[in-house]
Image (spheres, helix red, strand yellow):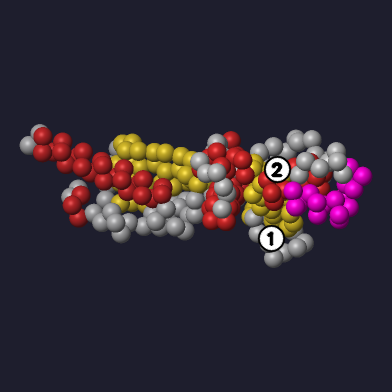
Amino acid sequence: MNHDTLDLEGLHIPYMETTNFGDYTIKIEHDNMSESPRDWDNLGTMVCFHSRYNLGDYNDHNHKDPEEFVFDLAGLYDEYHMEYLTQRGMDKSWAEIHKKYIILPLYLYDHSGITMSTTSFSCGWDSGQVGYIYMSLEDVRKEYNVKRVSKQMREKVEGYLTSEVKTYDQHLTGSVYGYSIEKGDEQVDVDSCWGFFGDEYDDNGYMLSVIKQAIQYDITQSSQQVEMFN
């Protein structure tokens, strides 16, 4: 096989299919054994409330409902316990929370599978708010080594928290993949790797770049071996 004629840059590799490229066989499949990204070292803390699904960082917290969580996060439960669940009490709680935290709502859409977002879904019947993801301003200052959390820094952290939710959503929707590369009629293993989170319609995704690098490396090694023994 003349590998010089192979166009790696233009190679399209469909997910969930077998792709033949020269004498290489590439398979991309779902990774059904992937770990939850909430087990990683995340910046945000994700608290969820759901009767059927174990979501977020933990679903066995001591808060009986989201309102109690908000009251407790604000640090006002003891001081204003008589106003718990009143509009006045919640207004005070949110005022305190915004002084101490960057916090985003979490919404869940449950229909033939579940998907999560920091923005609400258009279907009110099968969706609703399920919790929050947040990070304290104290942790922001430590993480980014700043004395003051500016508006720009808040937006940066909000973007990071949104990205964490997007990655977690890929876990919930099964958008986690792995690949294997074999070569020749004897199906010699070239490379394989699992645990890629991403969009199967992204031709410029990270996993596809890794696949192409693995093939390019094998082509280079094969060429060097040919030269060595000729």
Against 212, residue 202 (above or below) is below
* Disc on res. 47: 2
Local crowd size for mark 1, using a 10 Å CA cut-off: few (<14), some (14–19), many (≥20): some
Q: Is residue 51 left or right of residue 20?
A: right
In the rendered image, residue 169, in percent from the top left (x then y), is placed at 60, 50
* Mark 2 vs 1, N-terminal side: 2
Q: Position of residue 171 (x, y in %)?
A: 58, 45
The residue singled out by tag 1 in the image is 120
Residue 86 in the magenta stretch? The answer is: yes
The amino acid on which the numbered mark 2 sits, given as a three-letter code, is Val
Residue 84, percent from left and from top: 88, 47
Residue 170 appears in the figure: no
Q: What is the secondary structure assignment of the residue under circle 2?
A: strand
Q: Quadrant of the C terminus?
A: top left
Q: Is residue 155 above or below residue 100?
A: below
User: Looking at this view, is 152 or 42 the one in front?
Assistant: 152
Q: Give the residue at the far right of this rendering.
A: 82
Asked if labels 1 and 2 touch by Cβ distance under 8 angstroms, the answer is no
The answer to if 34 sits in the magenta stretch is no
Write down the region rendered in magenta: 81-96
Which amino acid type is shown beneath numbered disc 1? Ser
Q: Mainly helix, strand or loop, the magenta region?
A: helix
Residue at position x 20%, y 39% in the image: 222
User: Residue 142 shows which numbered tag?
Assistant: none
Q: CA distance from mark 2 to mark 1?
A: 17 Å
Label 2 Cα crowd, 10 Å radius (few <14 / some 14-19 / many 20+): many
143 on left or right of 121:
left
